[in-house]
Each structure stands twice: as structure tokens, then as C-alpha cells.
């Protein structure tokens, strides 16, 4: 209905941006990505030469004739690999491939299962990032909203001012640095948590032990993300709830004899939810980047660590694929946020029902 | 606006700002960092460009904590010292020139130096010299540490001779001979010369256990190291020397695995963070303001088109594209600023545009137009002053984000190769697993600086917002 | 017995600068099926009186003294819990000034109307919704408004919804606080007519608060004129409007422009409403009263009956 059209618009917007981003990146990186292929072609030609005594003879005796042969081979091979098509067309095709998840092969990196297919590499890392990030954000949301509500109820109290200070300080903290601090404190000085990785070596037996081991490894990264993020949520919740509590309809709700708890959690929170969610989801989306970098501190085998390695090794296909996937996640989060907002705030829906 | 009006407004603003406690705290922090940034080229002029030149840092100790750690621990770590010799006692006889110098060292530490290095400078013809080092301990015992020929490294007619005590086999064997006199034979037999911590027996009491780090008892007192240099060649003159006693601690912030003085790195990094943060924020807000005002003023279809463009920019995720661009272009701070601006301006544009619209709808604008005021006048006289408070607060509040992003890019390895940045220091720390090795001095200060500089702008920005905002409500 | 009886009610706002005596020793009663108009300038305390009756004074407001008897029960003595369960909305409900913001934008009309029924009567959602639809019809709205959201309704429609919601528990007393102020004249007339109809059909007792004397004259059986936290005149609409006794009432009525009659300059009351933290001594109106004399400055006048059912607080009588 109204909601459907609204979401429809947002999705189209997101798709447009995605296509644009992929295209721009393909344009920028085409040359780099093709270098690999060109180097490979040179290798093939060299291998062909070495394996063929006649060609070796030609190479030694008649340079010019050999060169002509090389050029011919290059032309054939370029055509086979599609390198002879006009530049823009190659960029265009690369972009289309990206959107279909055809990322090609990595130059240096291998996935844990040994594959060099970039799509596999990325898709193996993705769920781990999602696991870490989602777990942390759920905890942040719960803690943030509860604290914010409490602070709004007791405006001006110690808790209230504490939250203001915490949110200001955590806005300037690099999340990945806090991760490093966590490791020093809780892995080095007070060794209760592992310093990184996804599982212990050797991995524990499946079932409950494996789950406990996973949680043990998940703990520090999640604590890091939560520590740095909850302040902003609590602060925004507090401000918006305070503002909402002044509204007339809250007084009306009380006049109607509705229990105070329902007034707070039902009417107030529910009415304040749309702006709370917009503000905080936007900052959540912004912190996706930080969380991703934090992974590399903890050697958490997700997208973040993949980024770190891909940059160190300058593995272009992986970088390009990562960009596409990350952009998709990012835009999906935007659309999700719009969807939730539309569900919560009836005023934004377009369509039937308007007077 | 007349100058006198502006001055009065500024003074008034300043008085209000001073009353704001958190704003003042932020300002003080900021001034501290500005001083650091200015001091960098004065105190350590060569450190900045030589950050990646590992040769430059050779004579620093490796991976040691700051010197002030001795205040807090009962075990005193040897503080890195370099003793410069400018004038020798020179005597010549029968074609041989002899240079002598006695280094007097008052040793009050519990943990001896990590290593020793002697560098001799000379001028003239390339030829070897003979070096003799005699080591006299406070308990009266002494040994000949070294007695060998050294060959120079030369640059034109400047010659340099060096002896790394720990890696010189004859030195090590001399020390082992000395230690053998007092040490437990079992322990002696298990010693491997290439990992032998030779300074322990030198600076410990002459009794069993003196070779072992845990068991050796420090021998405190005055040590005399006698350096004697012989040259046989005529065309050569020894101009000076220096003895580097590699400390177990160094300076204000210690050193990293590459022997780099972290304090100097931190100082130079301040420049980058300040520059990138402020410039990126200012330019982003400026563009946002210009774009927003223009778009609000043009109205109609043109405005809609401009809005679409802004929305697209707003929706592009900064991080992956920043990484791509940084990896593609030569990593330099100006490219980082460019990236930050390209992804940053759109956020401000939305708010500016809505403010501009609100002002535009006001009756006094219509009145102005009726009088015949041109667009430019209306914009500068009426719209801009309403936007200014938002703009200033936004600039201040936008800096921490820029600093964090720059640090993140550096941390991932995309820093400017010609400069040090705080993120780069952390990148190296992470790569060297400094966290699991407990090297807190490598990990804590850079991040702390990032946080504090960001915090200073947050405090200033919040204060600006509080002071300037009520006036915005004129709208 | 009167269904509502207010005795010596004092409601102050305790601010840093002092106590604002918004309602200072007010007494009146309301009979079943009667509508009482509460008139006065802005800031005279009439809205505060309304909030005090339902015990929803915004902080720092507090009922300092006095009794409010609804159906014989003194509600000032009840605990918050009892108030919430037994009195609010069940015995006494309120229509607020400016319905614009009185409805929560994220809940449907149906939900907000059903809430009192679910919490007070224990009805199921379905039953409550049915009842809500019935009341919507009662106020002249279509039944499917239950599925609408507040932003989809016009001001007049929202006010009707508020009226329906206020009546849904069949309260004894309905307080209407400036219900027509934010609406245009045509809608105003519609709402007034609606309220008249409901009064006739349901026999509810209404306290109608407004600064607009003409609106009150349409609907009120009796009128109380308030000034500076006190009731200065109280009587049937006819007697107060046609034979105003208190100088303030007279001045108010003179200030209303008339279509018929000689064209005259607009009359107004000189001066400004007094500071309620430190009101004038004696009769609070004396600084602005053209008939003031010595006694007026020293002694506060009491409400005295001057004719049957017509009371005035003025030393002239």
C-alpha cells in the first residue's frame, strides 16, 4: 500500500547508487585488474616459446620474426580474454559482472577452503562479519535504549550526566584502537580472553564446546563494539524521549488512566522510536566501517581482516569485490532503516488514506 | 556588517565561550596539540621525513618502554645513553698515534643495557684502526672487552668505524671468559654465544648466576670504560667517537620494533591529524553551505536535480570507496582530504538547504525583493548570517570524524608515505603484534592522542552549538 | 446531591520565584446533566482548575488545599493508583485544548479510543473496537475512522475523536478545555452543536472552559467568571449575561463587539492581569476597577448571593 510504494522508491534509489558505485570503481580499477591478465598472457607466451624448440630457435636467430609471432599470439589471446574490446565496453562488462557477483580470481589470497575464487573468499568471510556486527548491535540497542529511557526519566541525575559524558567521549574513540586496548588488558595483563581468531587451535569438538569456544572468541570484539557505540544510542534516546514526554498526547494518555509503565514504554517510546531509529541507525551504518576495521585487530576472519590483507597484498580483484559487497550491505542497511521507519511512523507512507 | 559591529559580536561571543567549562577544556586541549605540532620541526627536525628510513633510528634501543617507567617500578631499567667523545688524549710515537679516553659511568640500575655500540669518526685516508676497550668494574675486577682491527665505512674523506659489541664474536668470547671465572660450570656449558645476553655478567656481582637474567644481582657503582684507538697510517686523524649504551627504556614514549622514537612520531603525527581534520571539515562545510544555498535559491527543477545529486553522494558508503581511492591514488594527505570532502559535504547540504528555505519564506525577504535587492545581497545579508552559527558548530563537530577516518585509512596501511601519522604507528603496532606482547607504550599513546584531539573538537563544537544556537531560533 | 462539588480548592504552582496562586480558594458545584461555563481571560486559572479536577497538574503544580467531591468521593484524598483505576476517565474525563497534539501520531484512532475500555472495563480488543466505532458514529464520524492515523484527519475531525474518546467510559463529568479555540468558525459551530446534542442525549455534565464568552453562551446553563484565580461571579447564563453584576463581567461583556446596534469604539479593560505570585491585596480586580473604593483594597470580597442562584464577589453588593 502506502508503505510499499515508499519502500519501492527507496530500493530504486539504493540500486541506482549501487550501480553508480560499482561502475565508478570498475572504471578506476580496470587498468589494475587487467594488469594481472596481461601478465598471465605474457607468461603463456613465454611458456609456449620455451616448450617449443622451433620457437626457441626462432627467438635466437631471427628477432624480428619472433616478435611478429609474439604480436600475433598476443592479439589472439587478448581477443580470447576480451582485452581487445573498446575500453568503456570492458569497464561496462566488468561492472555487470560485479553486480552478478562474478568477481573473478584473486591474485594472492586464498580462502580457508583453498579457493581462489573471489566470490567464494568474500562469501566465506561475510557471515562472520554479520555474526559479530549483529550480535554487538543488538546488545548496543538494548543497553542504549534502556539507559536512555532511565536517564530521561531521571533528567539531571548522575546517570543522565554520565551518559552525556560517555557519549561525547566515545564519539572521538577509534573503535579499532579500543579493540587493541582490550587485547592488552584482557589477553595480556589479565588473560581471560583469547587475543583473536575465530576458534581455538586445535578446534574444539562440535556442539556445546564449539559454541562456548565461539562465544569465548566473540566476547572481546563484541565488548569493543558495544563500549564504543552504546553511548550515542543512550544519548539520542534520552534526548528524544525527554522531548516526547513533553508532548500533549502523553498527558492525555495519563489522563485516560493508562498505567505509567505503558505510558512510558508504549506511548512515549513508540512515538519517539522513528527519530531515535533514524539517528541511531545512521550512526550504526557509519560505524559499520569502524567495526570492519576492528576485525583486523582481532584477527576475526571476516570482511575487515580481508580488507587488511587485500591492501597489504594489493590484491585488486578482492578489493573490487569487497567494495561491491560492502556497498551492497551498506545500502541494504539504508533500505532496512527506511523500511523500519516506515513501519513505525505512519506519517511517511504515501498513498491511499490521505485526506 | 560593519567592522565595529563584528568586533563587538566577537568579543561578546568570546566572553560567553570563556564561561563554558567544557568548551574551555576543549580549547586548552587543542592548544596543547597545536603546540606539539609546531614543536615537531623544532625539536626533531629530521624525524618526520625519516620515519620509514630505518637506518636513521639505528642507535636507539629496540622495543623499549618510556624512561619514566623507572619512577613506578622497583626494578630500575637502564636508560638509554649516548656518550659523546670530542677530545681524546693524543700521543704519537714511532709512527703510531694513540688516542685514549676514559668513560666514567655511574651505574644505579637493576637491569643492564640491552646492548653496546661504539662508533669512531675519522678524517683522511681509508685505513683500518686498532681498537682496545678496557672495562673496569666498581668491585675492582676488570677485563679487556675488545682488542681488534676495525675497517671503515667512508663517504669522501669522512670515515666511520663501528663495533657492535653484542654481535662481535671476540667480544662475546672475552665476556664469556670473564664470566667463566665466577659462574657455575653447568650453567656456563649451556650458554649459546649467539643469544648470550653479554651485558648481564658485565654489570652484575661476581658470583654464580651472573650470566642469567633472573639470577644476576646488579653491581652498582662507578664503571670505567677505557677506549684506546691506535692508528698507524699517517694521513688519518680521529675526530671523535660515541659510545651508545642501549637502554631498556628510552625517552618520553619509548621505541617501537624499528627503534623509532615514538614521541617524535607522535609529534609529527599531530601535524597530519590537525591539518587533515580541520581542512577536510572546513572545506566540506563550505561546499555544503554554498551548494545548499544555491540550490535553495534556484528552486524548481534545478533544485530538484541538485537534490538528487546530493542524495546519491550521501548514500555512497565512505569506507570502501575511500579505501579504493586511497589504494589507487598515491597515498598522500591531500588525497585523504579530497576523499573526506567528497564524501562529507552532502550531509551538511541538507540542513543548510532547509535553513535557507525557511529564511527564504520569511516576509522580510519578500520585502527586500520588493525594494529591488539583488539575489546576492539577499543571500549575504539575510541568509548567510542565519546559516553561520550552524556552519561554525558543524565545522568543529566535523573534525573528529575526519580525524578518525584518516586514522582508519592509515591504520589499514594507506597512509602518506612521506609522513608519520598516528594511524600508521598503530598499523605498525598491530602488524608487530604489540598487543599480545604487552607493549602498551606503542599502543596506548597514539590512540589516546586521536581520542583527545577529537574530544577537544567535540567539546569546542558543543560549546559553540550551545552559545550560537539560541540565536538561530530567531527563525 | 451534586455530582461534582468543589470546596475551597487551592492549586498553586511552586516555582523558584514563589508560589503562583493559579486557583485560590474556589468553590462551586455541578448538577447532573448541567453544563457549567468557566470564563475568563488567559492566565486567570481556568485551565489550571480543569487540570486540578482531573488531578493532572503539570509539575510544579500541586493541590494545596480544598476538596473535590465527585459522586460524593473526595478525590484529593485518593492515592495515585486509586485515582488512575477508579477516577480518571471513568468518573471524569477531559477534552484538551488544541487536539492537534492530543493524539499519538503512531497509533491508530481505534487503538487510542480502545485503550480506556481495555484498561478500565477489561474488554477485549474486538469488543473495545466495536464500542469505539459506535462512539465515532455518535460524534458524526464514519466507522472506518478507527483505522486512520491522526495525521490523516482534519482539526475538526480530531476534536470529534477526542470528544468520542472522552465519552467512551460514560463519565460523570466531562471537562472541555477550550475545545473550539483552534478551529475555524464553521467547525466551531459544528462542535458546539455536537456537544449540545450529546448533552441532551446522554445527559452528561460538562464543564466548558473558554475565554470566548459567545461560545459559552451557546452551551452553558450556568456560568462562572474567573479572575486572577478566583470566581468573581456565578449564576445562570441568562442572569449573568443579561444582568452582569461584577464590574469585571460587565467590562468583559462590553468588550464583545456586536453586529447590531450603534457603532461604537471598542471598549477594553485598562491594565493587565495581575501577577499571581503576589496578587493585589483585597479584591484582586481593584487596580483595574472603575468602581473601586477603600474597602476594595483591604478586604477580599466573598461570593454572596444577590438573587436566586446568582452570586457575586464584590463589595458593591
Image (cartoon, coloured by chain):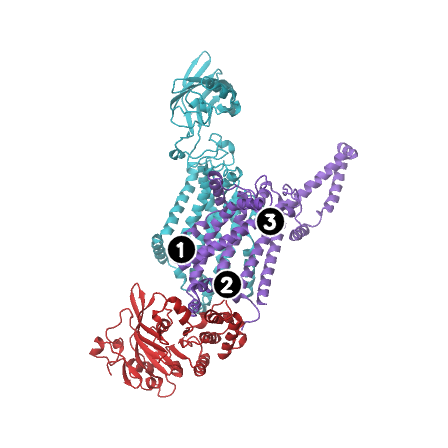
Chain colours: A purple, B cyan, C red
Between residue B50 and residue B4, name the one nearer to us.
B50
Q: Label for residue C42? A: none
Tell me which residue sits at (72%, 45%) in the image: A78
Between residue B142 and residue C205, name the one nearer to us.
C205
Tell me which residue sits at (34%, 69%) in the image: C77
Estimate the x, y position of residue C293 in percent, counting from the top left: 21, 79
What is the chain letter for disc 3? A
Q: Label for residue B296? A: 2
Q: Quadrant of residue C193?
A: bottom left
* Residue pointed to by mark 3: A126
Callout 1: SS: helix
Question: Are discs 2 and 1 less than 8 Å apart at CB?
Answer: no
Estimate the x, y position of residue A143 in percent, counting from the top left: 47, 54
- Which is more N-terminal, label 1 or label 3? 3
Estimate the x, y position of residue B203 in percent, counting from the top left: 42, 23
Q: CA distance from mark 3 to mark 1?
A: 38 Å
The N terminus of chain B is located in which quarter? bottom left
* Residue pointed to by mark 1: A160
Callout 3: SS: helix
Left or right: C28 in relation to B361: left
Amino acid at each position: 500500500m502506502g508503505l510499499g510504494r515508499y519502500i519501492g522508491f527507496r530500493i530504486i534509489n539504493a540500486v541506482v547508487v549501487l550501480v553508480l558505485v560499482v561502475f565508478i570503481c570498475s572504471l578506476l580499477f580496470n587498468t589494475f585488474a587487467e594488469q594481472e591478465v596481461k601478465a598471465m598472457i605474457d607468461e603463456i607466451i613465454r611458456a609456449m616459446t620455451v616448450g617449443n624448440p622451433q620457437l626457441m630457435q626462432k627467438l635466437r636467430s631471427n628477432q624480428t620474426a619472433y616478435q611478429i609471432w609474439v604480436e600475433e599470439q598476443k592479439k589472439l589471446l587478448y581477443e580470447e580474454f576480451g582485452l581487445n574490446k573498446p575500453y568503456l565496453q570492458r569497464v561496462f562488462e566488468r561492472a555487470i559482472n560485479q553486480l552478478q557477483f562474478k568477481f573473478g580470481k584473486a591474485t594472492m589470497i586464498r580462502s580457508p577452503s583453498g579457493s581462489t575464487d573471489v566470490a567464494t573468499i568474500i562469501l566465506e568471510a561475510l557471515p562472520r562479519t554479520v555474526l559479530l556486527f549483529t550480535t554487538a548491535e543488538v546488545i548496543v540497542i538494548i543497553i542504549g535504549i534502556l539507559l536512555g529511557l532511565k536517564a530521561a526519566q531521571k533528567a539531571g541525575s548522575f546517570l543522565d550526566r554520565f551518559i552525556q559524558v560517555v557519549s561525547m567521549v566515545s564519539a572521538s574513540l577509534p573503535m579499532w584502537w579500543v579493540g587493541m586496548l582490550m587485547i592488552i588488558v584482557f589477553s595480556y595483563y589479565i588473560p581471560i580472553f583469547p587475543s583473536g581468531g575465530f576458534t581455538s587451535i586445535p578446534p574444539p569438538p562440535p556442539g556445546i564446546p564449539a559454541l562456548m569456544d565461539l562465544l569465548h572468541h566473540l566476547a572481546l570484539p563484541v565488548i569493543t563494539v558495544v563500549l564504543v557505540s552504546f553511548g550515542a544510542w543512550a544519548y539520542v534516546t534520552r534526548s528524544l524521549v525527554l522531548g516526547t514526554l513533553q508532548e500533549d498526547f502523553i498527558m492525555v494518555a495519563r489522563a485516560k488512566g493508562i498505567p505509567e509503565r505503558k505510558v512510558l514504554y508504549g506511548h512515549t517510546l513508540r512515538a519517539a522510536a522513528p527519530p531515535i531509529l533514524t539517528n541511531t541507525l545512521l550512526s550504526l551504518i557509519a560505524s559499520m566501517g569502524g567495526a570492519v576495521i576492528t576485525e583486523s585487530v582481532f584477527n576475526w576472519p571476516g570482511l575487515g581482516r580481508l580488507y587488511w590483507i587485500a591492501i597489504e597484498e594489493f590484491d585488486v580483484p578482492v578489493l573490487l569485490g569487497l567494495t561491491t559487497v560492502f556497498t551492497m550491505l551498506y545500502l541494504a542497511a539504508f533500505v532496512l532503516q527506511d523500511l523500519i521507519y516506515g513501519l513505525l511512523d505512519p506519517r511517511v507512507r504515501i498513498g491511499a488514506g490521505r485526506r | 556588517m560593519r567592522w565595529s559591529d563584528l568586533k563587538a559580536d566577537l568579543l561578546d561571543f568570546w566572553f560567553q565561550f570563556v564561561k563554558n567549562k567544557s568548551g574551555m577544556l576543549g580549547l586548552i586541549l587543542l592548544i596543547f596539540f597545536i603546540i606539539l605540532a609546531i614543536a615537531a620541526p623544532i625539536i626533531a627536525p629530521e624525524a618526520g621525513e625519516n620515519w620509514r628510513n630505518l637506518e636513521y633510528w639505528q642507535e636507539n634501543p629496540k622495543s623499549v618502554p618510556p624512561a619514566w617507567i623507572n619512577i613506578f617500578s622497583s626494578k630500575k631499567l637502564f636508560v638509554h645513553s649516548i656518550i659523546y667523545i670530542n677530545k681524546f688524549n693524543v700521543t704519537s710515537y714511532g709512527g703510531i698515534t694513540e688516542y685514549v679516553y676514559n668513560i666514567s659511568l655511574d651505574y644505579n640500575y637493576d637491569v643492564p643495557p640491552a646492548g653496546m655500540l661504539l662508533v669512531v669518526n675519522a678524517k683522511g685516508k681509508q685505513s683500518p684502526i686498532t681498537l682496545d676497550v678496557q672495562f673496569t668494574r666498581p668491585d675492582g675486577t676488570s677485563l679487556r672487552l675488545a682488542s681488534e682491527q676495525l675497517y671503515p665505512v667512508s663517504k669522501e674523506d669522512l670515515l666511520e668505524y663501528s663495533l657492535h659489541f653484542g654481535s662481535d664474536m671476540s667480544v662475546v668470547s672475552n665476556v664469556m671468559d670473564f664470566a667463566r671465572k665466577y659462574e657455575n660450570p653447568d650453567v656456563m656449558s649451556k650458554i649459546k654465544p649467539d643469544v648470550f645476553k653479554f651485558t648481564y655478567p658485565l654489570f652484575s656481582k661476581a658470583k654464580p648466576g651472573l650470566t642469567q637474567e633472573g639470577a644476576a644481582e646488579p653491581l652498582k657503582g662507578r664503571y670505567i670504560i677505557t677506549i684506546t684507538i691506535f692508528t698507524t697510517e699517517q694521513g688519518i686523524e680521529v675526530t671523535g667517537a660515541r659510545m651508545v649504551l642501549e637502554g631498556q627504556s628510552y625517552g618520553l614514549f619509548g621505541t617501537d620494533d624499528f627503534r623509532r622514537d615514538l614521541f617524535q612520531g607522535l609529534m609529527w603525527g599531530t601535524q597530519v591529524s590537525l591539518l587533515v581534520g580541520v581542512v577536510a571539515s572546513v572545506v566540506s562545510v563550505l561546499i555544503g553551505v554554498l551548494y545548499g544555498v544555491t540550490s535553495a535559491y534556484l528552486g524548481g527543477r534545478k533544485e530538484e536535480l541538485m537534490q538528487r545529486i546530493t542524495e546519491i553522494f550521501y548514500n555512497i558508503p565512505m569506507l570502501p570507496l575511500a579505501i579504493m581511492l586511497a589504494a589507487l591514488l598515491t597515498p598522500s594527505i591531500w588525497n585523504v582530504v579530497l576523499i573526506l570532502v567528497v564524501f562529507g559535504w552532502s550531509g551538511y547540504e541538507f540542513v543548510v538547504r532547509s535553513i535557507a528555505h525557511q529564511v527564504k519564506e520569511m516576509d522580510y525577504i519578500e520585502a527586500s525583493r520588493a525594494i529591488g535587492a539583488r539575489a546576492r545581497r539577499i543571500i549575504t545579508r539575510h541568509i548567510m548570517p542565519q546559516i553561520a552559527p550552524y556552519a561554525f558548530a558543524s565545522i568543529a563537530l566535523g573534525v573528529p570524524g575526519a580525524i578518525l577516518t584518516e586514522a582508519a585509512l592509515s591504520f589499514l596501511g594507506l597512509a602518506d608515505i612521506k609522513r608519520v601519522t598516528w594511524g600508521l604507528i598503530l598499523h605498525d603496532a598491530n602488524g608487530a603484534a604489540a598487543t599480545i606482547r604487552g607493549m602498551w607504550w606503542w599502543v596506548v599513546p597514539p590512540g589516546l592522542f586521536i581520542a583527545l584531539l577529537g574530544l577537544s573538537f567535540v567539546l569546542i563544537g558543543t560549546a559553540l552549538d550551545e552559545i550560537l544556537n539560541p540565536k538561530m531560533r530567531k527563525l | 446531591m451534586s455530582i461534582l462539588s468543589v470546596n475551597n480548592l487551592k492549586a498553586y504552582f511552586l516555582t523558584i520565584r514563589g508560589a503562583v496562586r493559579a486557583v485560590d480558594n474556589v468553590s462551586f458545584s455541578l448538577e447532573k446533566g448541567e453544563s457549567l461555563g468557566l470564563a475568563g481571560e488567559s492566565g486567570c486559572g481556568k485551565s489550571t482548575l480543569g487540570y486540578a479536577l482531573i488531578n493532572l497538574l503539570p509539575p510544579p503544580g500541586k493541590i494545596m488545599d480544598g476538596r473535590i467531591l465527585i459522586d460524593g468521593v473526595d478525590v484529593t484524598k485518593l492515592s495515585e493508583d486509586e485515582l488512575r483505576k477508579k477516577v480518571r476517565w471513568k468518573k471524569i474525563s477531559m477534552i484538551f485544548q488544541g487536539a492537534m497534539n492530543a493524539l499519538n501520531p503512531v497509533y491508530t484512532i481505534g487503538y487510542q479510543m480502545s485503550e480506556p475500555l481495555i484498561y478500565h472495563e477489561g474488554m477485549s480488543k474486538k469488543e473495545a473496537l466495536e464500542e469505539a466505532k459506535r462512539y465515532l458514529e455518535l460524534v458524526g464520524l464514519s466507522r472506518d475512522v478507527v483505522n486512520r492515523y491522526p495525521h490523516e484527519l482534519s482539526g475538526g475531525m480530531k476534536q470529534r475523536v477526542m470528544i468520542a474518546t472522552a465519552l467512551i467510559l460514560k463519565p460523570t463529568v466531562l471537562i472541555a478545555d477550550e475545545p473550539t479555540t483552534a478551529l475555524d468558525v464553521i467547525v466551531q459551530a459544528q462542535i458546539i452543536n455536537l456537544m449540545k446534542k450529546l448533552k441532551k442525549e446522554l445527559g452528561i455534565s460538562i464543564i466548558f472552559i473558554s475565554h470566548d464568552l459567545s461560545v459559552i453562551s451557546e452551551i452553558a446553563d450556568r456560568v462562572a467568571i474567573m479572575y486572577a484565580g478566583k470566581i468573581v461571579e456565578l449564576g445562570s447564563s441568562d442572569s449573568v449575561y443579561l444582568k452582569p453584576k461584577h464590574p469585571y463581567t460587565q467590562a468583559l461583556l462590553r468588550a464583545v463587539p456586536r453586529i447590531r446596534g450603534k457603532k461604537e469604539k471598542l471598549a477594553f479593560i485598562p491594565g493587565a492581569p495581575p501577577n499571581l505570585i503576589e496578587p493585589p491585596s483585597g479584591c484582586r480586580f481593584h487596580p483595574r476597577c472603575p468602581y473601586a473604593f477603600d474597602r476594595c483594597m483591604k478586604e477580599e470580597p466573598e461570593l454572596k448571593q444577590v438573587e436566586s442562584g446568582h452570586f457575586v464577589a464584590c463589595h458593591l453588593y
